[in-house]
Image (cartoon, helix red, strand yellow):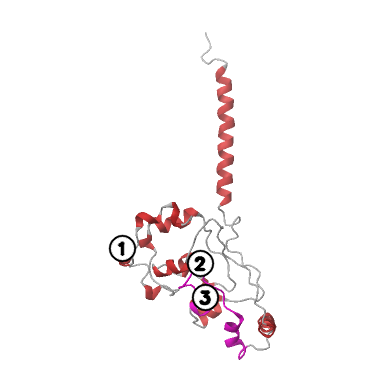
Amino acid sequence: MPQIFSKKANYLARGSIVMTGVVFVLIVLISHNVTAYTHDLGVAFQQPAPFSHKHHVKELGIDCRYCHQSVEKGPFAGLPPTETCYTCHSQIWTNSPLLKVVRDSYTTNTPIEWNRVNNLPDFVYFDHSVHVAKGVSCYTCHGQVDQMNLLYKENAFEMIWCLRCHRNPEAQVRPKSEIFNPNYDYSQHETLGKQLVEQYGIKKEQLTNCWICHR
C-alpha cells in the first residue's frame, strides 16, 4: 500500500507544533503584560505620610477639589501644598508622630515629595479638565478612593481600557453636579447618558482617533 503522506508532511507537522508553541508563548506574554501584578494594581504605594482618602473624603466629607485644586483647570489634578494640610493640622493632631513630615515641611518651607500612584507614559496626552468638563468623574478612572485608607492604583490605564469609555461615553458621563459624588447611582443611567453626550457636545466619532491621545 502506497504511503498516504510524503516526507514533507513530517516537516509540516513539526513546523505546526513549533508555531503553536510560539503563538501560545506570545499569548501568555501579552496576557501577563496587562495583569494586576505587572501594573501594581491594588498595591498601596509607600508615602512620606500615611494619608487616608477614606478618612478625609468619606468620614470628613472633604471635596476632591479642596486638595486637587487644578483638576477643573488644567491637565494635572494638582497636589495640595503643605499649607492646605496645615489649615487643619495646625489645630488638630498637632503632635501626632504620623504628621511630623507635614510639620517639618511647613516649618522649613520644603514641599513634601509624594510618590505618584498613577503615571501615564510621555507619549500619551491626558487633560483632567477636559474630562471633568465632559462629565467624567474622578471615581470612573481612580476607583472608589473614598474607600481607600491608603491610595492604590485601581485600573491599569492601558489603551484598550481608555477605549472602552471613548467608544461608549454614554455609559460613564454624569451630570456635572454628580462628578465628585462617590455614591452616584448608574442604575437609571441608560437614557440620561445619551442625553448628556449630546448636551456636552461629545463627538463620539472623534474619540477613537489616534490624535486625541497621541499628539
**Main secondary structure type of the part rendered in magenta:** loop
Q: Position of residue 157 (x, y in %)?
A: 52, 58
Mark 2 vs mark 3: in front:
3
Local crowd size for mark 2, using a 10 Å CA cut-off: few (<14), some (14–19), many (≥20): some
Amino acid type, callout 2: His
Residue position for label 1: 194
128 or 211, which is in the foreground?
211
Quarter of the rendering containing residue 43: bottom right
Mark 1 vs mark 3: in front:
3
Q: Is residue 19 above or below residue 75?
A: above
Q: Is residue 158 above or below residue 25?
A: below
Amino acid type, callout 1: Lys
179 or 14, which is in the foreground?
179
Q: What's the magenta region? A: 65-92
Q: Position of residue 63 (x, y in %)?
A: 48, 79
Q: Earlier in the sequence, mark 1 or mark 2?
A: 2
